[in-house]
Amino acid sequence: MKLKLYTLLFITLLYPKFLFANTQYFKEGIKLYNKNKFEQAKFKFEQDIVFNPKNEMSYLYLSKIFKNLNIKNLEEQNLKTVILLNPKNEEAIYFLAKLKLDESDYKKSKELNNRLSKLCNKYCDKSKKLKIEIENLSKK
């Protein structure tokens, strides 16, 4: 009985520290990302995901890191994860549509851009420009 009580007390005391660590990993990742220290930032975002697997923003920043490192398959994988976690994340939809356009997948890019234009809150202008870009490139 005493052991259970000590265990419960130990967990209760440590739990706030884990919560604090969770937010710290993400914040540290942002700072490192802004300094273009992509490998270190990547590690911090991955640590954040271990503690909070539903943090769409960590996946979004990982996709941005992989974009900067020119690792397209991991960029796409992380963007898809963001959209899976939050189907209304305009930024992820926009960047995935751009990625598909770069890969000459005009159909998928157009489909994603149509989805983006229906949500249209922050990325309305970018969506309109992307639509023109898709139309121009798909005609070639």
Image (tube, grey):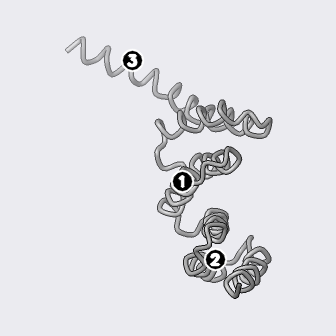
In front: mark 1 or mark 2? Answer: 1
Residue 101, picture quadrant: bottom right
Residue type, mark 1 in image: Asn
Residue 123, percent from left and from top? 74, 72
Q: Residues within 10 Å of mark 3 (few under 14, many from 20)?
A: few
Q: Residues within 10 Å of mark 1 (few under 14, many from 20)?
A: few
Q: Residue at x 67, y 36 (%)?
A: 29
In front: mark 3 or mark 1? Answer: 1
Residue type, mark 3 in image: Phe
How far is disc 1 from disc 2 in space, using C-alphas?
21 Å
Residue 6, percent from left and from top? 32, 14
Secondary structure of the residue carrying numbered label 3: helix
Q: Earlier in the sequence, mark 3 or mark 1?
A: 3
Secondary structure of the residue carrying numbered label 1: helix
* Residue matched to label 1: 73
Q: Residues within 10 Å of mark 2 (few under 14, many from 20)?
A: many
How far is disc 3 from disc 2 in space, using C-alphas?
47 Å
Residue 5, picture quadrant: top left
Q: Residue at x 60, y 48 (%)?
A: 71
* Residue matched to label 3: 10
Q: Is residue 26 above or below residue 81?
A: above
Residue 37, percent from left and from top? 73, 33
* Residue matched to label 2: 116
Residue type, mark 2 in image: Leu
Viewer-closest of 93 and 70 = 70
Q: Is residue 76 above or below residue 88?
A: above
Viewer-closest of 44 and 2 = 44
Left or right, 72 with respect to 124, comes to: left
Q: Is residue 53 above or below residue 38?
A: below
CB contact under 8 Å: marks 3 and 1: no
In front: mark 3 or mark 2? Answer: 2
